């Protein structure tokens, strides 16, 4: 990305006039540059732009934004549950830009990634790249740095193949996740888990922990496994299988919509919510009366995931909700 700066000496007098004569023509012809990163939600490309901001000449450099406008930037975060994570990422970006180096986050959930990119794209002197190992990755690492330093896609995601005989004892996503976390690895060091049926699973992880997992992971559930490194190009993945249905609800309360989507009683769903077993857009929710909207992703421990599709009103004042269950 590009930034236009005026040295501090150009405050008044002849020096200011001289600099203005050189700077203004180039500023008037300035066009913000763009770069492309993977859109983790649809697998398409997301174009990020660096807009002009109110400053001396309408452009906000990163150091200035961090010092003076950080609170304003964070006020624009739509998902308030992500604010602390976004704040840490902005600080990381500050260090990367000032030192002209490239720094990487751990794997981020989609809401944190989305909000962080929306904030960072408003800053000059900064380039961002999000990578999760394959085009449709949900959990991605965000690389930030000065444009002169971040010239290529970083090599910051490793792939592992976990294989074993799962013919008679199939294992779920949760089984693989639990086994990996059981080795002592933190969740944010782990990306997506791609199930391979009877063959096992492919897993994305931070490169510095790949050797550890290869040696430490020997069992998933009751199945003995072997773990080896594989190239990212060897990853096997398919779009998730889903099943859609519609439900008529009197309200858009979480307990009502989720109980219909997961086909469990509303009483049981309310209990799961209060026990902290339900997440909306990857954030734990403990209030049953939380309002659900189109696009929300509901995850229930032991039950899987549910996406809320189109919501429309019926003639009787109720809500027709499209429920997309991940199989």
Image: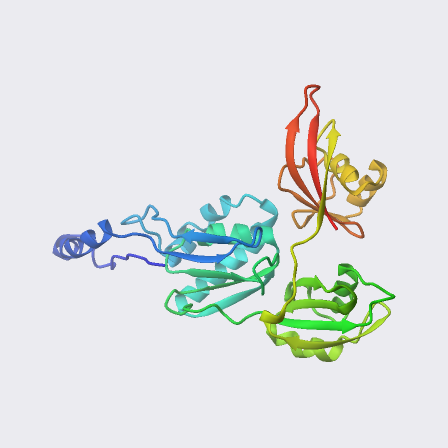
Q: Nearer the viewer, residue 147 or 53?
A: 147
Residue 90, placed above or below residue 287: below
Residue at (83% x, 42% y) in the render: 271
Residue at (69% x, 63% y) in the render: 193
Q: Position of residue 161 (x, y in %)?
A: 69, 72
Q: Position of residue 16 (x, y in %)?
A: 17, 54
- Its colouring scheme is rainbow
Residue found farthest to the top: 316
Q: Position of residue 248 (x, y in %)?
A: 74, 29
Q: Nearer the viewer, residue 118 or 138?
A: 138
Residue at (53% x, 50% y) in the render: 115
The total number of labels drawn is: 0
Q: Position of residue 75 (x, y in %)?
A: 50, 44
Q: Nearer the viewer, residue 120 or 1?
A: 1
Q: Nearer the viewer, residue 84 or 208?
A: 208
Residue 186, placed above or below residue 274: below
Residue at (35% x, 56% y) in the render: 33
Q: Is residue 96 left or right of residue 23?
A: right
Quadrant (top left, top right, bottom left, bottom right) of the N terminus: bottom left
Q: Is residue 21 left or right of residue 104?
A: left
Q: Dividing the picture into quarters, in which one does residue 307 lie?
A: top right
Q: Is residue 259 left or right of residue 168?
A: left
């Amino acid at each position: 990305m590009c930034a236009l700066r005026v040295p501090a000496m150009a405050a008044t007098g002849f020096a200011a006039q001289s600099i203005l004569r050189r700077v203004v023509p180039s500023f008037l012809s300035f066009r913000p540059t763009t770069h492309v990163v993977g859109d983790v939600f649809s697998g398409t490309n997301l174009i990020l732009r660096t807009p002009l901001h109110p400053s001396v000449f309408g452009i906000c450099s990163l150091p200035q934004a961090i010092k003076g406008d950080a609170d304003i930037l964070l006020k624009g975060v739509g998902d308030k549950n992500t604010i602390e994570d976004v704040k840490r990422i902005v600080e990381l970006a500050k260090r990367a830009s000032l030192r002209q180096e490239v720094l990487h986050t751990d794997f981020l959930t989609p809401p944190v990634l989305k909000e962080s990119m929306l904030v960072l794209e408003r800053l000059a002197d900064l380039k961002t790249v999000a990578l999760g190992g394959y085009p449709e990755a949900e959990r991605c690492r965000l690389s930030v740095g000065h444009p002169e330093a971040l010239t290529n896609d970083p090599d910051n995601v490793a792939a592992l193949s976990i294989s074993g005989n799962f013919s008679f004892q199939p294992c779920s996503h949760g089984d693989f996740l639990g086994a990996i976390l059981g080795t002592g690895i933190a969740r944010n060091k782990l990306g997506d888990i791609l199930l391979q049926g009877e063959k096992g699973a492919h897993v994305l992880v931070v490169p510095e922990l790949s050797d550890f997992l290869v040696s430490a992971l020997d069992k998933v559930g009751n199945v003995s496994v072997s773990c080896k490194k594989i190239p990212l190009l060897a990853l096997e993945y398919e779009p998730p299988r889903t099943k859609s249905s519609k439900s008529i609800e009197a309200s858009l309360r979480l307990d009502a919509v989720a109980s219909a989507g997961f086909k469990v009683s509303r009483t049981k769903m309310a209990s799961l919510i209060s026990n902290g077993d339900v997440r909306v857009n990857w954030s734990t929710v403990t209030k049953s009366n939380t309002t659900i909207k189109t696009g929300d992703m509901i995850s229930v421990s032991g039950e899987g995931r549910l996406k809320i599709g189109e919501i429309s009103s019926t003639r009787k004042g109720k809500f027709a909700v499209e429920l997309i269950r991940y199989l």
